[in-house]
Image (spheres, rainbow, N blue to C red):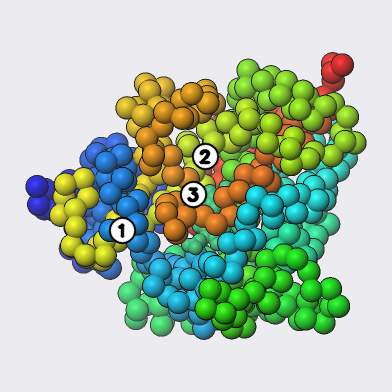
Amino acid sequence: PGTTAVPGPRPLPLIGNALDVPSGRTIQALMELTRRYGPIMRLHTPGGDRYVVSGLDMVDDLCDDERFTKLVGGGQLILRSRFTSAGLFTADTDDPLWHSAHDILLPAFSTRSMRGYLPQMIDVAQQLMLKWERTNPGDPVDVTADTTRLTLDTIALCGFGYRFNSFYRETNHPFVDAMLGVLAESQARSRMFPALIRARRGAEHRFARDLQLLTGTVGAILDERRRSADPGDDLLARMLTGTDKQGRQLPDHNIVSQCITFLIAGHETTSGLLSFTIAYLIKHPEVVARVQDEVDRVLGTDPGVMPTAEMLGRLTYVRQVLDETLRLWPTAPAFTRQPYADDTVGGYPMARGTAIVALTPMLHRLPEVWGPDADDFDPEHFAPERRDALPPNAFKPFGSGQRACIGRQFAMQEAVLVLAMLVQRFELVDHADYRLQIRESLTLKPEGLTVTLRPRTGRT
Ligand code: HEM
C-alpha cells in the first residue's frame, strides 16, 4: 500500500491536525486516535507529515538500528538550539560529540558503577523515609512532589556529588521550576509560526532567564568540583577527565549540556514511575501483600538494616510491579525514529527522514502480546516465564538500540530501592479514593495523587 492509504483524522487547511492533538494532552489524544485509526496513522503538522505507530511489526522495523535512527524534532530541537552543543538526549546520532560522550559515560552506568551509587541513593531515600515517618497520622503526603524531590536529589548526588536538599524546601527547587519552564516553552514554540515566537517578548525574556538559571546552577557545580581537592568518582569526574576512543576530552560547553541533560532526564521519568506505582498499589491490596512478603523476606523487618545490591537483585516481584507500571504508563511515552534511506514500516513506504513516532503506551497494550486483560494492571504480565516469551520489541519503555536510555539500570535500582524501603515501613492508604488522571508535560505523571501513611504493624 502507498502512504496515502495510511488512515488518520482529516486535516484542516494550514493547521493540519493540530486540533486533534491538543497540547497538554497530546499522548492521551494520540492513544484515543490510535484506538480509532489503528496501529499506524498519519498526522499533518505545520512541520510536515508524521506517522504514529504501535503495531509490533512496525516497531520491529523502527528498532532496526541499521535502517532507522532517532529523529530529534519539535521542542527538543528548539531547546538544543539554545546551547553551544547538544547533550546525549538531544544530539543527532551522527554528531561526533554524541559518540564521545557516549563512550566516556557508558562505564558510569555499568553494574559495578551502580553498586557504587547505592550509598548515595540510600542517603536520599532515607530523607524521604524520615519525612514520611514524621507526618502526623491522617496528614496526606503529595506523592509526586516528594518523589520529584527524591529523584532530583539522587541524580545530583550520585552524578555530581551535589546536594539540592529538596527535602528541606517547601516548594520546588528553582532548578525544577526553570526546567519545567524551559521544557514547556520549547514544546509550545514547536507548535508556533516563527513570527509569533518573535512577537512574544515576555516569553523570550522568561525563557532566557530560565535557561540562565539552568546553566548557572551547573556552572556552580562545575566550579565547586574544580576548586575541590577531591576529583570524585562520578559522572562529573568522568566528563572532566575521561577520554573517548580517539583520546579526546569533552569540551566545557558540552559538559554543561550533558549535566543539564542528566539532571532533567535523570529525574522526571523515575519520579513519574514511582508515583504511578504508588497509584496502582493503593488500588491493589493483593499486589501489596505479595510485595510486603518479598520485602520482609529479603530485606527483613528491621528498617535499620540497609539494603545491599545483592538484596535488591532478589526483589524480583518488586521489579515485576515496576515493569508492569512502565508497561501501562511508560513515563517517557514515545520515541521518534527516521529511516536513513527510503524504506518501509509495516509494509508502508516511508521516505528518508520521515518522522515516525513509536507510541509505547499503545504498543504495550497489544492484546496479542499481553492477553485480553492488556489494559489492566497485573504484575503477572511479567511473571518470569511470560517475560522470557515476550517478542523482542514488545516492551520498550527505555527506547531502542544505541539511542536507548543510558540510565535504565540507574532508574530501576533507585525505584526498586525506594519502593522496597517504603513498603518495609508503611502502609499506603488511599484516603481520598484516588482516580487516576494523567498530567502531561515532557513526561507523564499521575495528577493530584496523595496518600496517608500508617506504620506497618503485625510483622513478626
Ligand atoms: C534516553 C526513558 C531514566 C538518562 C531515554 C529514552 C527513553 C528513556 C524512552 C530514549 C528517548 C528517545 O529515543 O528519544 C527513561 C525512563 C526512565 C529513565 C522511563 C525512568 C524510569 C533515566 C535516568 C537517566 C536517564 C535515571 C540518567 C541517570 C537518559 C539519557 C538518554 C535517555 C542521557 C539519552 C541517551 C542517548 O540518546 O544517548 N530515556 N529514562 N534516563 N535517558 Fe532515560
Q: Comparing marks 1 and 2, which lies closer to the viewer? A: 1
For residue 156, say whether it is visible: no
Q: Tell me if the residue at label 3 has its CB under 8 Å from ligand 1.
A: yes
Q: Residues within 10 Å of mark 1 (few under 14, many from 20)?
A: few
The image quadrant that residue 372 belongs to is top left
* Amino acid type, mark 1: Glu
Q: Is residue 58 left or right of residue 414?
A: left
Q: Amino acid at mark 3?
A: Phe
Please state which of residues 295 and 286 is positioned toward the viewer in this rendering.
295
Classify 237 as above or below 253.
Answer: above
Neighbourhood count class around disc 2 (C-alpha, 10 Å): few under 14, some 14–19, many 20 upward: many
Q: Which residue is mark 3?
A: 398
Which disc number belongs to residue 66?
1
- Mark 2 CB within 8 Å of ligand 1: yes
Residue plotted at (37% across, 35% down)? 391
Q: Earlier in the sequence, mark 3 or mark 2?
A: 2
In front of the other: 45 or 205: 45
Q: Is residue 6 left or right of residue 430?
A: left
In the image shown, does 19 or 438 lie closer to the viewer?
A: 438
Q: Amino acid at mark 2?
A: Leu
Tag 2 residue? 326
In the depicted structure, whether residue 416 falls above or below residue 382: below
Image position, residue 249 (x, y; %) = 60, 80
Q: Position of residue 340 (x, y in %)?
A: 26, 65
The Cα atoms of the two marked residues, 1 and 3, are separated by 19 Å
Displayed quadrant of residue 302: top right
Can the viewer see residue 62?
yes
Left or right of residue 1, residue 72 in this image: right
Sequence-wise, which precedes: disc 1 or disc 2? 1
Label 3's element? loop
